[in-house]
Every structure is written in structure tokens, then in C-alpha cells.
Amino acid sequence: MKRTIKLGDTPEAWQAEALLAKAQRYAEKMLGQDSDDWDYALWSSLLLELLARAALSNVSPALLAETDNRTWNSLYHSLGFQPKEQRYVPRSIAIAEVMRRLGSILPDLNQELEDFGVLHTGRRNAELHSGEAAFEGLPGSSWQPKFFSVCKVLLESMGHTLGDLFGEEQAKAAEKMVAAAADDSAKAVRGDIEAHKKVWQAKEDADREKLAAQATLWATRRAGHAVACPACQSNALVIGEPVSPPNKKLEGETIVSTQEFLPSQFECIACGLKITGLSRLNAAGVGDKYKQTITYSASDYYGVAPEEEDDGRYFEDDNNEPF
């Protein structure tokens, strides 16, 4: 008869519920300060780390465990077992790695929000471990909208809301803050587009044709997804991060792999317009998800050495498929 080893109880320090409860305590501390004060920002950074770890533990506590080629004791500990190593101290991964893993797991935690999470908790490290006053004089408008956006994504991944952590009144204020920041971002990017459009239209016809042709060639040869530039209508590219696992299908003797991406950057070499951040991309009309398609031969995909020289059975990425 098969014997199954049952997992032990998750250590309290790595339980999603315990981490979330501690984040709630820190939220109370944060809200007890003036929102423009440095200590309000400090408590928010401490809160964000606990909330991020709670969200990752909610997927699996094992994802919090530090592992390397020499030891797996922390992973073993996260599964509810007691390592036999003497003087063992469980270690979890750094917050930057927590945010990176969450960015890969949670579709709504886009690159812009992931980067903010790393930046904001990094300021905490500077505040606590150096002589730098990292939060002193930091305007709330520069970080609070993204902070509450990240918190919202993390909480919703666990079945909670902003109101559950901050109270309904603060949650309403946070939603307005996020909406206002998105509106400001939209206004700013529209101004950039109009400025590039005027410069483009002032060029000679021959120059515009030459630049547009160069942009078409450039967009064809580089990785990304081809879109029309909102300023000059030339071929441009958006690049982003995957938001779903590859979907592979066998079609005849080839394997077709498709994967969804969420844009994070835009560039047009014809008029020089560049846009970074999903909120600004959405405002510019180039923030939609897109699909990338890669086609393999079965032998290439499964690592079978071909008997003949390369005959073109591996095809380049198709970066022009609409979502």
C-alpha cells in the first residue's frame, strides 16, 4: 500500500493570515500619522512588504522560502517540517524577489506597479539601514496613488478589499486618488502626443516617407508588438510582460505557442515618441493586451537533433497578431 507523507502546519511566521493581520496593525499606525509626514510613508512601506508576503503566501508559503544550491531547509520548513540541521534559522526571500514573483503570478500587478513596490520598499531599507532620510519631503501625490493601486491588487488576490485593510472612508479616498492620478497621466501623455504630432507634420513629405519606411523595417526586426503610433501613424512597437502561461497546440508537424502580454513600454523611431507605464499607455490608446505567437517544428521543440541542416523549420516571432 502506498504511503503518503502529509505536510505539517504552515509556520505562523509565513502564514498568509498572520502576515495580513500584521499588515492591518501597521495600517493603523500609518493612518495615525499625517499623510504628508515622513513616518506615514515609512509605515506604508512596512505595511506593503507584509501585504506582499501575505499575497505570495496565499498562493503557497513555499514561494517565500529562500533556496539555493546548498540548502533547502527553508523550503522544507515552509511545508511544515522541522529541519534537522543544528542552529537552523528559516530564511525567506528578499522583498524585491517577492514583488517579482507576484508580478509573474498576478495578472493585474503590471510592470509599473511591480516596479513601484520594489522602489517603495527600497526606500524603507534606506530609511532604516542608512543615514539617508529617504521619506523626508516626499510628496504624497508622487507615491500614494500607486501605493493604493498595489495594495488593491494584492488584497483582491486574497479576496479582500481596500476597505478591509484601511476602512471604508480611507478606501473611498484612495479610489479617488487613483482615479485622479490616472486622469493626470492621461492629460500629460496627450500633451506629449500632440507635441510630437506637430513636429511630425512640420517635416517635408520626403522626410516623413523616409522615416516611416525606416520605422517599418525597425518594427519588423525587433521583438515586440507592432502598433500604429498615435502621433505620426507610423509602425511602432510596444513591449511588455507575459500575463498568462504559453498556450501550445500541435498543428500538423508544428507546435504553435501563443501567449498574452500586457504592454509596459512604447517607442516610435519615426517621430521619437516614447511612453512608459501602463496608465500612460492606456491613455495613449496603445495599452491593450496582445498575443505573441511562436511556431516550432516538433523536433526543435522537444530537443531532437535534426538529421539535416537547418531548413527553416523554426520561424520568427509573429509580433503583429491582434488580441
Image (spheres, rainbow, N blue to C red):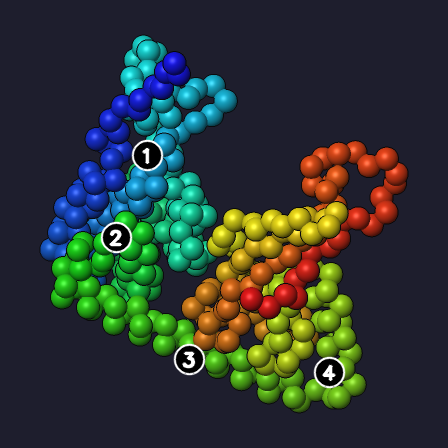
Task: Tell me the element at label 2.
Answer: loop
Q: Which residue is mark 1?
A: 61
**Residue 317 appears in view:** yes
Residue carrying label 2: 159
Q: Quadrant of residue 73?
A: top left
When asked about the image quadrant of residue 160, the answer is bottom left
Q: Does residue 292 lie above or below 201 as drawn?
A: above
Disc nearer the start of the sequence (2/4): 2
Disc 3 is placed on an element classified as helix
Residue 37 can be seen in this image: no
Residue 235 point in image, percent of width and height: 67, 73
Q: Report the Cα–Cα distance between label 1 and label 4.
A: 56 Å
Q: Quadrant of the C terminus?
A: bottom right
Q: Amino acid at mark 2?
A: Gly
Amino acid marked by disc 3: Lys
* For marks 1 and 3 on the same chain, the one whose residue lies earlier in the sequence: 1
User: Mark on residue 187?
Assistant: 3
> Is residue 136 depicted above or below 298 in this figure?
below
Which is in the foreground here, disc 3 or disc 2? 2
| Residue drawn at the location 24% of the way across and 26% of the way down | 9
Q: Which residue is mark 4?
A: 208
Q: What kind of residue is marked 4?
A: Arg
**240 in relation to 87, above or below:** below
